[in-house]
Each structure stands twice: as structure tokens, then as C-alpha cells.
Amino acid sequence: MKLITTIFLLFFCFGLVAAQNSRIHGQVTTEDNQILANVFVELMELSLTTLTDAQGYYEFEVKEGAYTLQYSYVGFESIQEKILVEKGASVLVNIEFAATNYKDVAIVVNEEAALSIDQKTSLDGQFFEENAQGTFAKSLEKVTGVNAINVGVGIAKPVIRGLSFNRIVVNNNGIKQEGQQWGADHGLEIDQFGVDRIEIIKGAASLRYGSDALGGAVNILPNKIIPKNRIKASLLGIYKTNNQHAGMSASVAGRISDFFFDARFSYQDFGDYRVPAEVFVYNEFVLPIYNQQLKNTAGKERNIRASLGLIKNWGVSRLTFSHYYLNAGIFSGAVGIPRSYALDIDGNDRDIDVPSQQVNHFSLVWNNDLTIKQHRLQLNIGYQNNLRQEYSFPHYHQLPPTDNSDVALQLNLQTVSGDLIFTQNVNEKWKHVYGGSFQYQINQRAGFEFLLPNFQTVRTGGYWFGTFKPNKRWVLSAGLRLDYAYNYNDKYAQAVYGERQTIQYLPKVAMNQQHFFNYAAALGMNYVLRKDVWNFQVNLGKSYRVPYPSETAANGIHHGTFRHEMGTPDLKPEHGYQLELSSHIKWKTVQATITGFGNYFQQYIYLSPTGKFSTLPEAGQLYQYVQTDAIYTGGELDWSWQPVPELTLRQGYEYVWNVNLQTQLGLPFTPPASILSEVRYEWKKLGFLENIYAQITHRYSFAQNRTDRNEPETPAYHLLDAGLGFKIRIRKQVIQIGVQAQNLLNTAYLNHLSRYRILEIPEQGRNFVVTLKVPLEFALK
């Protein structure tokens, strides 16, 4: 910690040294020469922002280098402009906004899309305010190709093109989020109201992020830095009718000269949620759901984040601390065999009873983004401590208590990680990216149950990625990554009660250590058939994934999933080979993106439902990690049409098909195909209301009949949502109000990826969500 503080202070002191500055300035107008004031202008590399003045002018003071400017204005599609700034130069960039175009959050096209082997989707904070679900991961489901594995309404994790767990990296402020993401009942420790902007990378991203990004990545980018000598604050309140959810999120950000800060506090409290069912059926027994409420699904969530930084013409340095806390109940049937007496109402639908889980996630991250002439250097260092405690009763599974407490399982994961990235802009045609990463983890267990032994891991590697633009039509790319990984786990034997309360032991987990060397490679091509109208992209990649200790050393009950999970000690690394074809067309008021992808995996690791039951009482079905060769393929289609400037029609179709090449069956936990259709109408002003929108969204999810052996099928369903939002201006103060109606028809449906699916419990019923946001901003004298 002393070392980090010392280096941080050195950067601050370095920023006080005078340097010869350059300048970027210009004016923003429409194509018919109307001046646009209050246009949001962002210098992407430095996260620096400003607003155009009354005459449409803006200005940035920078150091020499390569920069990307993004211009955003209500009712227009954002514009990006890349420029090269020489030392002491004054660069004039005037921008004209063309005719109004719908800004589609799910279709983002970049002329240099081949800079990675994946497609990127960009979202901002407004997306989460208009589509707030119970969790950050659940809110992402509106993006085509993205789903969520969930346990109730408060716990979820993302799925990209059918892949999840340790195949998806969530990169939070430059550091990989580490919080036992291998578990289906372990959610992301992310505050959805604190997300300013994110990128979703679909497809293998092992080249940039290493082993765990074989399926894709979710990048949560650092918050934008507000203009100089200003203070910006907001207060957001949210209420949900289904589970009497009440929450709030307050933030403040400021910049005084070259120093900036931001802080946020969020709190959410929710009760047992309602489902459109009076009973559910388990193992041919009909069990009650009293008052249509799923007992013991209440919870509390709290998140605190604060950052402090310095911005100079040499770059940005920022230190961020966060603490995430979750205390959530787990439906009793997800831990042991559900019985009617455990489902009786207790008169309090907000209490959190046993079984439950508590999560504390601490994070300290230091980000540095520096410009060196026309090049860029990024250094990210982070420390995380994830403490997960799951509460239960020993007699559920005939386990002897260890310390007379009801802590069934405690996992304490500590992670130290670092990334160094150097971007070399050789000239307008050539660009090279060199990177290296290191991560060390130690996980310690406690509690009377056993799932994982103590373990340690090391992940380190380096990569190169280059792009070549011979002309305005072609972008060619190639990359290579080399990695080393190490896994170690202790031995352990689980004690259980035998006959006459004598203690006996299950088969031991042996001590195990493994070393792995792997590589990833990529080739990409992007061809512009017609500028700003039609482009075509091809990507080839070779990726890999190292087995995680949960897959080699697990042997116990996994709460919230009602199953016994068992590892296989001698698992080999996965190797994947990817081909992706995509094309984007934008013509007048219509735009569409179509993508086809195919993956061939060797030694694919998955959790197989064995058809056997655990030897522990009430521990459910036995699932074991096994390997096979497999094929994952599918496609996505996104299109939108704007027949008139105010009306937008959008539709997204997603499909994933896979096969286990040994059994010729589908792989478990594969999301079904679905079609998401949306109609959105916008008014700039209606009476005293401003920026009004109304939308109706319909999702049709096809039946999932292609399942693994011993995995239940899921029928098709329709889901209808609606939303309405507007702003009210009182003098200079703006108030934002939004209303959502989720599952408007109160449809009883089963989500194939829900962990309550095995108990035949439907998802949350009708839910009205009301949000109220009061933003504040003022200048400092």
C-alpha cells in the first residue's frame, strides 16, 4: 500500500512540471449552419468532457498525441473524430450534425471494428436508468446476444452467446472483477446505478484479457471527468411494486483546476418477490406458494464508491475505492428438499432468514492513462477482497457444526492484479498495441460445509496486437498472446454424521498443483464497401481457457442451485477456434447488423448433470465437471427503422446452437433463441414536459428442447414490457421521471437459465418500476 501511495504522489508531483501545451478547439453546428450550444464533447483517451458554449465553441488543452473526440447531442447520432496533435499545435475541428438519426444502443459500428476480433456494443448510464432490472447483469439482457443466469431477482451474472462463468471477463475500471464468478448463484458485485459507460465484447477476447475471456468481456469504463471548475451531483430514487423494492443512489463529482473527484452511495432494500402461481411441483409433490410470494427472497444491497484523481496534459491518474455489500435470502427449496412446513408464511415478507448469503467486496484500483507524444501508456493496479458467507443449518445434510455457528460456507478470495498497455501510433496506417498482465489469487475457506479447498492461482502473460490501414476501405489486424498459469489446492476431507451419530468422512480431495502454458492468436479484416453505408468484417481466432480450481477440486453442496458439484483433478486446458462474419448496413433511416459465428472447442469443460444423487442427504443431483469436444455456433440480427424522426422500430434476434461431439446432445445451461421487438416514440417537448419517450417491448423466447441428458426442457413464452419517461424543467432545474411496466401481462414462465428452474418455479410476475432523478450542476468561481 505504501508503494502504491508513493508512486501515486510521484505522478501528482510530475504533473506540476510545466510543459508546452497543444490545443484542440472548434465549433459545432448543424448542416444548415444553426449553432448548437450544450453539445457534450468528450476526449475519449483522457475521459475529459466539456460542453459547447452559446456560440457552439469548445476547447481542450492537451499534450501532443493521438486523440478521439466524441460529440453527443439530444436527438442526433453521436459523431466520432480521430485527430493527431503535434507539440505546441492548435488543431481546429469543426463538426456538423446531419439530419436526425436514432441512436440505437445495441448497434455501434466503428470503421476500425477489426481492431479486435469481436463486436463491441457501447452503453451509457441512461440505458440502465431506462432499463433497470433487479441487477446489473439482468439489465444487460436487452442487448442482443446477452442473457443472464439468475437466482431470484437479486443475484445474476451475464451470459454472452451461451457462455458464462469463467468464460466471461467483467473488467471494472481496468481491473478484472474477481468475486467467485465460477458459481451460478454468485452475482456480480456491481452497482448498476454507478455505471457511466460500458462496452460489451461478444466473442473470444482471450488475446486482450487472457484465459477467462474465452466467451467475451464486459468493460465498465472509468467515469467521465466533468469540465473544469464545476460540481455535478444527482439523487436517484427507485421503487418497485412486485417486491416492495425501495432504493436510492446519490452521487457527487467535481473538478477544481486539474484535480477531480467523484463519489456515489447506493442503497436498495427489497422484500419477497411475487410470482404468478399458487403452487409449484417438485418430484410429483404439489407444494404451496402462499400469497404468490416466494418466501425468503428478500435482501439488502449497499454500495459505496469514491475516487480522486489528477488530469494534466500528460494524462490522467485516478485512485478508486469501493465497497459492495449484499445480504440476500435464498428460497429454502434451493438448499434442501422443499417441504410445505418450510414454506409457511411468517408474517414478515422483508426478513432475511436462513438459508441466505452475505457478500462483502472491497476494491482499491489505481488507473493511469498517459500520453507520450502520439502514443498512449496505460497502467492499472488493483487489490480486491471478496468475502462470501453462506448460512444454513448443519442438520440439512447431516453435517457436524464446526464452531456452533450457522455459517455453512465461507470463501475469502484476495486478488492482486496489474495491467500495462502501450499503444504505439506509428502513423495513420500502422498501429501497435503491446500489453502485459499479472494476477495472483488466494482463496481460504471456512464453515461446516465443504465445496472448495484452500487454493492459489497465478495468471500472467503478454501480447501484441497490430492494425494496418492501407487505405480508407481496408483495415487489417493480427495479434498474438503468450501465457503462463498455475493452480494449487490443499487436500481436504469432509466430515458427516453416520449411523448412531458417529462421524465419518467422504472421499478426500487430494492436494493438486498444475502448470499451464498457452497461446492465443487472431486475424481480422474489415472492408468498407461504401463509406458510412456498408461494411463487412471477418475475424479468425484461436483462444484457450485454463481450468479453475472449482472445476478440479470441488466436492460438495452448492447453495442456491440445489446440487452437489464435483470436480475432476486432471482436467486439461480448453482450446477454442473461432470464425466470425458480420456485416453492417446503414441507409437513410434503416440500419442493420447481421452476424454469424462458429466455435470449435477441444477439451471443453462443462458441469454435467450425471443423473445420480448426492450421498449427502438433501443435497440434490450430482453434477460433475467433465471435458468433451464441442461446437458452439449461432447468429444475431439487429435492425432498426425510423419511418419518421420521432418513431423508431427495432428488433433483435439471437440464436445459439451447440453440440457435445461425444454424446451428440446439447450442452447444459444454453439459452434458447429469442426475438426482442421494440417500438419507441419520442417527443422533444409536450406542454411543460421535455425529452419524452414511450416504448413497448415484446420478447418471444423459443422453447429450449435441445438439452443435455438429465436436464429439463423449457417451454416457449411471450413477455411484454412498457416504459415511459420525461423531464420536467422548473426554472433551471431539471427533474427526470421514468416508469416501467415489466411482465405487463403477469405471464407465468420458466427461465431456462434460472437456478429455480429445476424446482419448476416461474419468474417474477408483474412489476411496476418508478424512478425519479434530480441532477444538479453548477460552476465554481
Image (cartoon, rainbow, N blue to C red):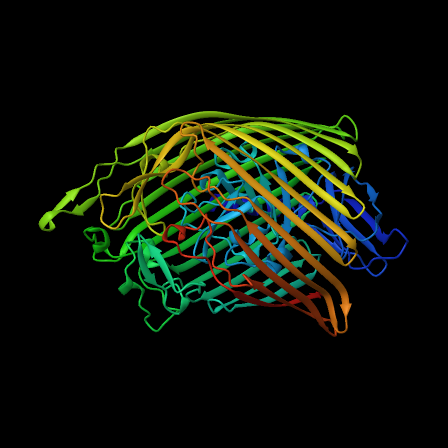
Looking at this view, is 212 or 174 the one in front?
212
Residue 506 versus residue 38 in the image, above or below: above
Rendering coords of residue 366 (x, y %): 54, 46
Q: Where, by quadrant of the figure, is residue 66 drawn?
A: top right
Please tell me which residue is depicted at 58% across the width and 59% down the height of the picture. Answer: 720
Q: Residue furthest left?
A: 500
Q: Nearer the viewer, residue 39 or 757?
A: 757
Q: Quadrant of residue 505?
A: top left
Q: How many marks?
A: 0
Question: Which residue is found at the position 53% from the left and 58% from the top?
Answer: 133
**In the rendering, at what x and y percent does residue 556 appear?**
28, 44
Image side of residue 279 versus residue 750, left or right: left
* Relative to 503, 628 lies left or right: right
Q: Is residue 17 visible?
A: no
In the rendered image, the vertical position of residue 583 relative to residue 696, given as above or below? above
Q: Residue 302, percent across and down?
A: 46, 61
Q: Is residue 67 above or below residue 721?
A: above
Q: Is residue 616 left or right of residue 655?
A: left
Pick the residue in front: 79 or 566. Answer: 566
Can residue 361 be seen in the rendering of this structure? yes
Residue 481: x percent and y percent? Answer: 54, 27
Placement of the C terminus among the 4 image quadrants: bottom right
